[in-house]
Image (spheres, rainbow, N blue to C red):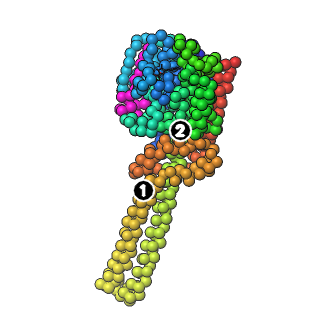
Amino acid sequence: MRLVFPNIGSGRVRDIETGVNRLYKAFQSTADSYRYTFQRPVITVGGRPNVVFLGNHSSGKSTVINHLLGSQPVQDTGVAPTDDCFTVLMYGETEQDFHGPAAVGQLPVEFSSLSSLGPDFLQHLRVKTRNRQYLKTVNLIDSPGMIDTAEGSSKRTYDFNAAVRSFTEISDLVFFLFDPDKPGTTGETVSVLSNCMFGIEFKLRVLLNKADTFDDVYDFARAYGTLCWNLARVLNTKDLPTIYTTYTPRPESRAESKLNLDGFDKHRAEVLEQLRNVPQRRYDSMLANVTSDFMRLSIQCSVINAVTRKLFFNRVRQASIFIVTTLTVFSLTLLPTYLFMLKGSNRFSFKSIMAYLLIFGITGICALFLAVLAHFKHKKLKTHLVSNLDQTFEAVYAEALVIGIRKDIRQYWNSIKSDVGALLQTDARFPLLRWGAKRRLNDAIYTTIPRLANKNRTGIKQRET
Ligand SMILES: Nc1nc2c(ncn2[C@@H]2O[C@H](COP(=O)(O)OP(=O)(O)O)[C@@H](O)[C@H]2O)c(=O)[nH]1
Ligand SMILES: [Mg+2]
């Protein structure tokens, strides 16, 4: 199968790259002020697109990959969970396998974010270079089968969701496979679908695989219906994604299948067409990553700003109370001491010195008491705000959450919440967000990036005609 690369050097695409770079440059100082690290969109010009296969164990991921590669199977297949590694299959003249940290070194630059997933994850990373024609145009990523129990994930020694999210962000197409035996979405599958697909739903292709194993049309309807029902509950999109009912042909498929496979063949052809067109979607993926980056930045800035603002106004209130109370105490001690001790007596007499000591002593003790109280109260408020960041987030985004303008806001928030909490616990100082900065961020997310995406789509359409 030959894949056609988009004309990456064309003026329109260069415009998109320039536009994106300009955006990153414009917001770098805001990101620095709020300690946000951009996950720069690294698109290697002419680089191969990436396609990841996710799904339950035994849903047929490795079998599809072997089928695409042809000749000798590269991946192990079997009914029992056979693989607990993420495997990137790349083109290479010499056939080699790399494990762990050595594997990262073999990967293109856009995979660099994987290193941050930690050493336990790297023990579950493999790169295989194979001299197969198909891999000249696309990198294929096989994944460990998801375990359909909630306890499954706890057995993993690394953050499985974070790993899946990284691979889906890097990839240009994400195939999610289900098999008729497990069309339910429970345990790890639910977790991945609801936490790792936000903002990149357009890359997702759901495959109800092993269609040749349906007993009859009712069996098919049951599996399809169950899958739709489960997907609707976990995906945050208005429409259900298209479900492609497919199978990987084997010599015995047609003889064994109890259903006519022609309809499923049509879906298989559509999936193969999607794979053929994947290079043209690279800029869409890159722009989706840019949107994710700016959404995270915007949420991080807004929440930190809301906390900083509350702390700032608390300080202002405390300072006002301090000044008013200290002045009041000063005046209240001054009046009686003046009347009874200072009036008519010598300025340096023992009585006068005692009067001054009394005035400044009482005022000083009061000021010290207020300062210590303010310090502890401020600390308590900060601890309260940091441990209830969800409340601040909900208050900041109340309108958007109620109207449902962007359903993915909460998921973006969940992905940065712990970082924001950790940042606020440090002694780092954050400026108050300037009014114009928030508006410019919104412009970038809701106007500039979609405009760049449209430019890309027009470019693709023109190339296709
Ligand atoms: N009938 C049928 N069996 C399949 C199909 N795809 C995979 N299998 C079988 O399902 C089992 C699990 O496949 P595998 O590719 O290892 O699944 P993975 O765990 O998702 O990688 C293997 O025994 C395959 O032979 C298919 O389309 N139809
Ligand atoms: Mg497998």
Name the foreground residue: 169 vs 250.
250
Q: Can residue 340 be seen at all in this image of the molecule?
A: yes
Of residues 22 and 412, the one nearer the viewer is: 412
Q: Is residue 299 above or below residue 96?
A: below
Q: Examine the structure image and report whether residue 129 is included in the region drawn in magenta.
A: yes
Judge the density around disc 1: few (<14), some (14-19), many (≥20) Cα neighbours within 10 Å. some
Rendering coords of residue 127 (x, y %): 41, 21
Q: Which residue is mark 2?
A: 194
In this rendering, does residue 201 appear at all?
no
Q: Nearer the viewer, residue 150 or 282?
A: 150
Task: Check the picture and name the quadrant holding the N terminus.
Answer: top right
Between disc 2 and disc 1, the foreground one is: 2
Magenta extent? 112-130
Q: Quadrant of residue 208?
A: top right
Residue at image coords 47%, 34% = 148
Q: Amino acid at mark 2?
A: Ser
On screen, residue 452 versus residue 28, left or right, reads right
Tag 1: amino acid: Thr
Callout 2 crowding tier (Cα within 10 Å): few <14, some 14–19, many ≥20? some
x then y, percent, for residue 443: 62, 41
Which residue corresponds to the image point at 42% horizontal and 25% vertical from the top-left? Answer: 80
User: What kind of element bears circle 1?
Assistant: helix
Q: Secondary structure at mark 2?
A: helix
User: Number of labelled discs?
Assistant: 2
Residue 122: horizontal and vertical position, in percent? Answer: 38, 29
Mark 1 — residue? 383
Q: Is residue 435 above or below residue 186?
A: below
Relative depth, front residue between 57 and 27? 57
Q: Quadrant of the C terminus?
A: top right
Q: Residue at 53% across / 50% down in the picture?
A: 393
Decide whether residue 325 is among the magenta residues. Answer: no
